[in-house]
């Protein structure tokens, strides 16, 4: 593992490993950490970096670009899309559809690699976000060095590793017992309910089954290729978990993938995040400015989770019962049509409902007191970096694990329980908010823990801090591997001539 004390530098010099092709899914949760990593490789390591997204994501990222297949540059990195054969942003319907898209991905990404080589910018290393085994195939085909960017917690990385290396049967046997505890090597005991949902949904949910299969393939390829793994976390947050995975995976700690608070306060354009959804025209920042310090409840369930009519009603009544000002994000495409009436009601009085916002700007605002969140890893890290306590309302994937970490391991929030229909009820929401915003000794300790982790997160991303040093070490390792590869190629050619 790349520890913070490592002082390796490359002084920004371009070496044999000078062009990274970072490949990510074109969804909000993958795009921003991938873009942050790409820009850090360019600025810290002096490398050429290209970020490649599916055409559907690239098109949403650059809506004014007439040709959605063209390369775009922001002055620091370039963006080149690849095709999955559909290009409509949809998920695969079944195994056959997934196979066809994967073949299209392979051909398109291979074409990107060839095109960059033909233009005098040959790729020397590919980096993929998790669950993209096709990138491993492309790297192998073109004899490129490879790194995996793990954009979930290190706890999830260790859990998946052990699930695929001897513990699948144990976990599967107890999949219907949510409170059953499993102790994996080096980790604290985890209940079944705190593990990735794909473990328990794999038999009756086709999407979960396909995602778990893709992760299985990725870990098999990692066993064969032994790539370096960049993890979007920091030592002060998951020190024990990072040490637990270190014997099995070559880990570099390069998170959190958020800008320093100083950049946020300056509204630094170079640090700005990308939004695949149009921000609401209502001036929510002016509204926040008008609220009292530490008074606002901020609620957002991210870019994928949808709202039913009943869920909207329950949240609305819960927020109104608390009598605190609230800012609530509800994507237009993420709700049932019949919920619109209730959202209109929600905009009256002490609350504001928007379709999208700059979450980091909101969380770092002085008026925000707590965050009701689905506990996606990006949202979790953003709350930690802003020192905002959380009401965790997990739904799927790694979110239950993140909620467990928030409540049990770090003590920076509480977990809300959904009812039998998967709905967060008004009573549960009110109970969690009244506790978290109250003056009890336990609530005060949660706020103190949140402030402490905020300081540790900002230390991690400070200039010449652990994140920068670890990235320099990673780049130098890639350069050294590139030099060894070139020397071996020269020896092989010499032997052929002889």
Image (tube, rainbow, N blue to C red):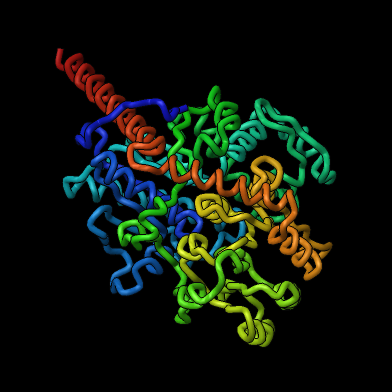
Q: Which residue is painted at 46% across and 66% down in the image? A: 358
Res. 94 visible in picture: yes
**Residue 120 x, y percent position in the rendering:** 16, 45
In this picture, residue 44 sits left or right of residue 136:
left
The answer to which image quadrant residue 241 occupies is top right
**Measured along the vertical axis of the image, is residue 187 above or below residue 202?**
above
Residue toward you, 6 or 336: 6
The answer to which image quadrant residue 484 occupies is top left
In this picture, residue 471 sits left or right of residue 223:
left
**Measured along the vertical axis of the image, is residue 32 above or below residue 255?**
below
**Residue 102 x, y percent position in the rendering:** 48, 51
**Measured along the vertical axis of the image, is residue 37 above or below residue 354?**
above
Residue toward you, 116 or 339: 339
| Farthest-out residue, top | 498
In this picture, residue 335 sits left or right of residue 27:
right
Residue toward you, 279 or 429: 429
**Residue 355 x, y percent position in the rendering:** 53, 76
**Residue 132 x, y percent position in the rendering:** 49, 46
């Amino acid at each position: 593992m790349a520890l913070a004390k490592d002082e390796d530098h490359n002084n920004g010099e371009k070496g044999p490993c000078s062009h990274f092709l970072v490949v990510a899914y074109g969804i909000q949760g993958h795009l921003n950490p991938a873009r942050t990593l790409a820009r850090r490789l360019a600025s810290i390591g002096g490398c050429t970096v290209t970020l490649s997204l599916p055409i559907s994501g690239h098109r949403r990222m650059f809506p004014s670009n007439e040709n959605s297949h063209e390369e775009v540059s922001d002055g620091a990195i370039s963006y080149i899309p690849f095709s999955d054969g559909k290009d409509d942003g949809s998920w695969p319907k079944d195994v056959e559809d997934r196979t066809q898209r994967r073949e299209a991905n392979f051909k398109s990404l291979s074409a990107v690699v060839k095109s960059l080589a033909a233009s005098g910018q040959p790729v020397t290393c590919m980096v993929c976000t998790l669950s993209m085994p096709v990138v491993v195939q492309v790297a192998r085909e073109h004899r490129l060095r490879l790194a995996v960017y793990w954009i979930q917690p290190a706890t999830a990385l260790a859990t998946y590793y052990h699930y695929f290396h001897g513990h699948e049967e144990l976990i599967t046997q107890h999949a219907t017992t949510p409170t059953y505890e499993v102790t994996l090597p080096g980790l604290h005991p985890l209940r079944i309910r705190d593990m990735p949902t794909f473990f328990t949904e794999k038999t009756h949910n086709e999407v979960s089954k396909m995602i778990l299969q893709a992760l299985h393939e990725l870990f098999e390829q990692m066993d064969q290729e032994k790539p370096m793994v960049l993890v979007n976390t920091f030592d002060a947050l998951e020190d024990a978990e990072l040490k637990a995975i270190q014997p099995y995976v070559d880990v570099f700690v390069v998170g959190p993938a958020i800008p320093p608070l100083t950049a946020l306060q300056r509204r630094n354009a170079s640090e700005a995040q990308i939004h695949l959804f149009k921000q609401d025209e209502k001036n929510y920042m002016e509204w926040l400015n008008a609220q009292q310090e530490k008074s606002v409840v901020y609620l957002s369930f991210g870019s994928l989770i949808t709202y039913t009519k009943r869920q909207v009603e329950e949240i609305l009544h819960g927020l109104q019962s608390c009598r605190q000002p609230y800012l609530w994000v509800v994507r237009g495409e993420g709700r049932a049509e019949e919920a619109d009436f209730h959202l209109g009601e929600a905009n009256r009085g002490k609350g504001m409902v928007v379709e999208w916002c700059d979450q980091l700007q909101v969380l770092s605002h002085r008026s925000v007191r707590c965050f009701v969140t689905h506990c996606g890893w990006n949202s979790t890290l953003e709350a930690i970096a802003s020192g905002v306590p959380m009401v965790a309302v997990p739904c799927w994937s790694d979110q239950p694990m993140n909620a467990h970490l928030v409540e049990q391991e770090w003590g920076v929030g509480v977990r809300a329980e959904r009812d039998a229909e998967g709905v967060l009820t008004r009573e549960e929401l009110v109970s969690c908010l009244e506790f978290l915003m109250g003056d009890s000794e336990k609530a005060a300790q949660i706020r103190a823990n949140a402030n402490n982790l905020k300081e540790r997160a900002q230390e991690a991303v400070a200039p010449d801090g652990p994140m920068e040093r670890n990235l320099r070490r990673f780049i130098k390792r890639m350069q050294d591997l590139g030099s060894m590869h070139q020397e071996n190629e020269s020896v092989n050619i010499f032997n052929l001539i002889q």
